[in-house]
Amino acid sequence: MYSIVMDKNKFLIKSCGITLYQGESLVDKLQFLIPKDYKGHDLGDFTVKMRYILPGNVSGSEDLNINKESYNDTHYSYTLPIDSQLSTAAGDVTLYLTFLKTDDLEKKKYQMRTSSVTLTVKPYETAYNPELGYGDCSGSGSGDDQYDVVEFSSKKNSDTYEVIEF
């Protein structure tokens, strides 16, 4: 299992996990550990989407489902099987999470985005060649580009919902 933790500043931090190989499907899992509370919001009430960008600039999205049991007193756990879409090509896969919630009574839409984190998918031939390297335990990357956070626009919806970014 490959674990990724969201910290109090919305940064995603990867743990030393498994090695991902090109073409693998439904064997390993991604686990996201998300704080239960962020700035007074219970993140368990939000829809969580994992957005990704594959090598070749192909993007996609997966809905994450909260696990029935909390990870601990402070974090929720979301687990997603790694499918062949994420491992279709060798190279870096960039992930980030978006949190969305609509309050129809107050006519507000809440949205938040985390930093991005990069997972490396090794070429298939490295699975049998130890000279080409194994899993990466270096954290969430090097340099400040790991915190490349894109701001949401604050345009109001035609349904007159106020967009709340936090």
Image (tube, rainbow, N blue to C red):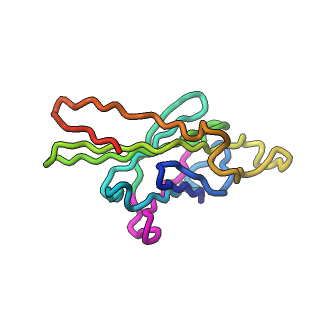
How far from the left and from the top, in percent, is residue 139?
Answer: 65, 51
How far from the left and from the top, in percent, is residue 56?
Answer: 59, 28
Toward the left, the furthest residue is 105
The number of callouts visible is: 0
Quarter residue 151 falls in: top left
What secondary structure prevails in the magenta region?
loop
Query: Would residue 143 appear left or right of 72 to someone viewing this image?
Result: right
Q: In terms of depth relative to the viewer, which is nearer, 141 or 68?
A: 141
| Quadrant housing the C terminus | top left
| Quadrant housing the N terminus | bottom right
Residue depicted at 76% across the width and 51% down the height: 134
**21 is within the stretch colored magenta:** no
Q: Which region of the structure is painted magenta?
A: 66-85
How far from the left and from the top, in percent, is residue 125?
Answer: 77, 42
Query: Would residue 56 appear left or right of 110 to someone viewing this image?
Result: right
Q: In terms of depth relative to the viewer, which is nearer, 36 or 85?
A: 36
**77 is within the stretch colored magenta:** yes
Query: Would residue 19 appear left or right of 149 to someone viewing this image?
Result: right
Residue depicted at 32% across the width and 52% down the height: 46
Residue depicted at 65% across the width and 44% down the height: 141
Residue depicted at 46% across the width and 45% down the height: 114
Quarter residue 18 falls in: bottom right
